[in-house]
Amino acid sequence: MNHLIVAPLLIPLLTGAVIVLAVNRSHFFHRAVSLAGCLVLVLITGTLMFQSVSGPIQVYALGDWAPPFGIVMVLDRLSALMVFMTALLGLFCLMYAVQDTDTQGKNFHALYQFQLMGINGAFLTGDLFNLFVFFEIMLLASYGLVLHGGGGSRTRAGMHYAMLNLIGSSIFLIGVGILYSLVGTLNMADLAVRIAAVPPENAALIRSAGLILFGVFALKAALIPLYFWLPDTYGFTGAPVAALFAIMTKVGVYVILRVYTLMFGPHAGAAAHLLAPWLLPAALITLAAGAAGVAASRNLRHITAYFVIVSVGTLLAVISTFQTQALAAAIVYLPHTTFVTAALFLITDMIARQRPNAGARLIPDHPVAHQTLLGLLFTGAAIAIAGLPPLSGFFAKVMMLLSVHTLFGGAWIWVFILTGGALGLIALGRAGTIVFWQTLPA
């Protein structure tokens, strides 16, 4: 077995444990250990990604217990891409956080590492129960990170976020329990075989369990009507945390893609194509709601948060076709939108720090320092997030649009994606005009 497969879990776990044990050491020590852990994680996940491109799917059985009875981690090209993205994003966001964000509480770096562990575990796990476990690790760390630094608005948003996800966790266990009672396994590969063989009298229960799980994953992905927690949570939390959280909604998207192509795919018998009536309409409405939020918001942080919702709607609209070319195009778009929204959170924070009266609110204030550099960064992020050439988002969007244009609902996907991109560009153009041109006298 390739022991590197569990390294994306062990490295942040051990790094976080060292920081917890050395809680009374200096901030410099915590920063050094945390940055070193993230750097090693990037190197390890980069190696795993290289191995996945040139090799077969790899399965790591913890304790050498054979599946489906033991805990397994699965490395293929998609999971390798996701953990590599997580490591890169984690390193970049941490490099930004060590300016001063991490000094607002002594447990920031430990929580940050446990957050990375939970996200990586969700991408690598091969069974539903351990998916629940890693969701909980990810969420427990995120509660602390959301509340890090305090403040009334942040605390309110964090409490709403925590309560909603606690309810989601309970519902997750109900769905998992129904599945286990019917088929006697939670290994995803084994479930794909057993669900197809479920007798007709249990078909309704299997479909119900699948839809219950979809509700939980939709909450994680911020799919309508379960997206309302995201704008305030991401808008009020610290910028490097919000930037890291850009990948958390992609955990929900990833799990929807995994579960409903593997377990509830075309060979799932009575549970085949379970999401066919629901996913496309929900994704398009999510995209529209996100675009409307982008256009209506008067705060740069909230605009960026709504762009996260737009990206979720875009990805799931294309994934809803469950066609090979469309899925490939969505996977190409996924890294682009994750890194661009994360970058926009950080650029927004750099701008807000230099506007003492307005902050991130879109009202005139004194000119920002390094206006040319920040203006170029903001313009580049706006072009990238709108999907304009010559940046990668343009080519990814073209791939997505071409992959769906002959499919059912393809015309609607075109309309919503193009309209959402146009509204986003208009909103960011308006924001840039206010921030960089409509300034008060120095």
Image (cartoon, helix red, strand yellow):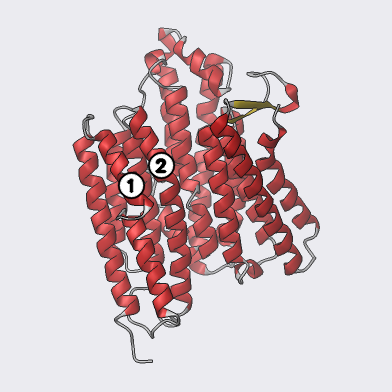
Label 1 residue SS:
helix
First of labels 1, 2 by sequence position: 2
Q: How many marks?
A: 2
User: Picture coordinates of residue 276 (x, y %)?
Assistant: 31, 27
Tell me if residue 278 comes above or below residue 342 in the rendering: above
Res. 158 in view:
no
Give amino acid for label 1.
Phe
Q: Is residue 187 left or right of residue 26?
A: left
Q: Which residue is mark 1?
A: 395
- Please give the name of the residue rendered at 22% of the width and 33% of the height, measured from the top-left corner: 409
Q: Quadrant of residue 127?
A: top right
User: Picture coordinates of residue 92 (x, y %)?
Assistant: 56, 59
- Please give the name of the residue rendered at 66% of the width and 70% of the height, measured from the top-left corner: 103
Label 2 residue SS:
helix
Q: Are marks 1 and 2 in contact (CB under 8 Å)?
A: yes
Res. 284 in view:
yes
Q: Which residue is mark 2?
A: 332
Tell me if residue 333 comes above or below residue 324 in the rendering: below
* Pick the front one: 20 or 226: 20
- Numbered disc in front, either 1 or 2: 1
Task: Give the quarter of the figure containing the N terminus.
Answer: top right
